[in-house]
Image (cartoon, rainbow, N blue to C red):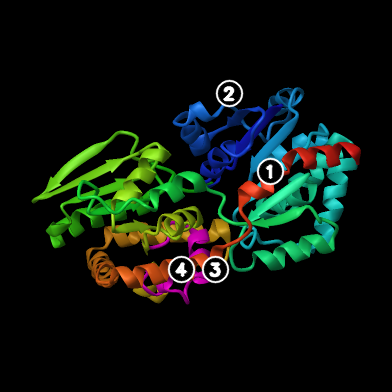
Amino acid sequence: MKILSSAQACGFGPVSKLVAVTTMVGGGTVDFVGQGVALDFVRRHADRFGRVTAGDTAHGTEISHRLVDADLVLSVMDADLVFWAVRQQRRVVFFDSLLHFWATRLTFAELARCARLVRQADTATAWSAYQRLAPHERILVAHLLATRSLVQNFPGVRERIAELAAVGADHVRLCGPIVDTTTLRALRTVPPRGDGAGLLINLGGFKNFYLDYESRNAYLDLVQRWVVDLARDMPELGHILACCGAFARPETIRVGDVRVEFRFLPHREFLDQLAATALYAVPPSLTSLHEAVIVRRMPFLLPEQHYGHIVNRRMVADTAVGRHAASLRRCGPEFEVPEDDLEGTRELDRLTRELVDDEPRYQRLRAHLGDRFGAYRALTASQRDDAMDELADLLDGPPLTSLLADLDMTLLEAAER
């Protein structure tokens, strides 16, 4: 079976899910086409794929010829790939970890009408209707178009599944973590090691539809400055390892007796580091939360990188992890940003840059981070375990492996329709 795949190039969340899925899909070679941080991540995990190609899935002429020989398409939140796959009558399994998050101005009935146009109209009409949708709406339409949709559990997801089912999408299935559960469960039995970092920080891929490594990077500047200050404030940490896609050129500095490293690690190496450390700091990223729950490493939530993190933190606010989190919003009312993915992210980046450049405001944030991190660090092992149990109850769902086990049956059913 020939499989073509791609993932939305927004941080490492989507593409790390795709890499995890490749271990669960048997009987075929998985090729990849994509760009940006998704392509960067796949190139570091090229052993999981047959062919890895740079390409923009939004360009029909660029992607269509790759679909000709595909028996199956795997898409992690890449709606454009779903559009072109459906136009070529290819079977699609669509994975989504953010179903609760996608905003729509349209009713689900209107989205369903658009999906019918994509399937039945001529290509120009279908593409025009699709292009008129907002980015979030395109992903919701991709759910309606897919042969099977698998959506990772989070508060609000079950309600969204019901809304999709009400307009005929009875192929959307709730699932648990879309992560490499086999590797993670093996690592959970490994106690923190003395040779692990005193603190592991995970900033993910960072790049998305607005943020980048070179100019819209205030968050990276903020965290890098705070890490150096934290090393001065808490020399007993000994070793701080900060991981991010932006750190492709490793850098190691000494702050007194503390070794501070900035690195971009292959995912398996990063997970080994996660298992080796007791203290773990990360923005409110859903993939990171799921991984932390399985490995049993309670995360300290850093301030939000982008608007999506604001929503995620809000959803876990009543948990122990949420109560011990840091947040820019706790530093003043000026950090209230528009309730919109693009505009909220844009404003958050602007405000973060102002904070980095304003010494008194930065020192207030430093004090807030130090207070929150200190409280997190003071938790007992039992309290951290309880926090992970609480979060696991919130995120649990049917195992992805069992849902993918009947993938061949899904293809058979699709062929009969």
Question: How packed is label 1: few (under 14 Cα within 10 Å), some, or many (20 or more)?
Answer: few
Secondary structure beneath dot 1 equals helix
For marks 4 and 3 on the same chain, the one whose residue lies earlier in the sequence: 4
Question: How packed is label 4: few (under 14 Cα within 10 Å), some, or many (20 or more)?
Answer: some
Look at the numbered discs 4 and 3 and tell me whether their residues touch, using CB distance below 8 Å.
Answer: no
Look at the numbered discs 1 and 4 and tell me whether their residues touch, using CB distance below 8 Å.
Answer: no
> What span is in magenta?
301-325
Pair 1/3: label in front: 1
For marks 2 and 1 on the same chain, the one whose residue lies earlier in the sequence: 2
Disc 4: which residue? 389
| Snapshot quadrant of residue 23 | top right
Disc 2: which residue? 50
Q: Is residue 249 above or below residue 294?
A: above
For marks 3 and 2 on the same chain, the one whose residue lies earlier in the sequence: 2
The quarter of the rendered structure image containing the C terminus is top right
Disc 3: which residue? 394
For marks 4 and 2 on the same chain, the one whose residue lies earlier in the sequence: 2
| CA separation in Å, label 1 and label 3 | 24 Å
For marks 1 and 4 on the same chain, the one whose residue lies earlier in the sequence: 4
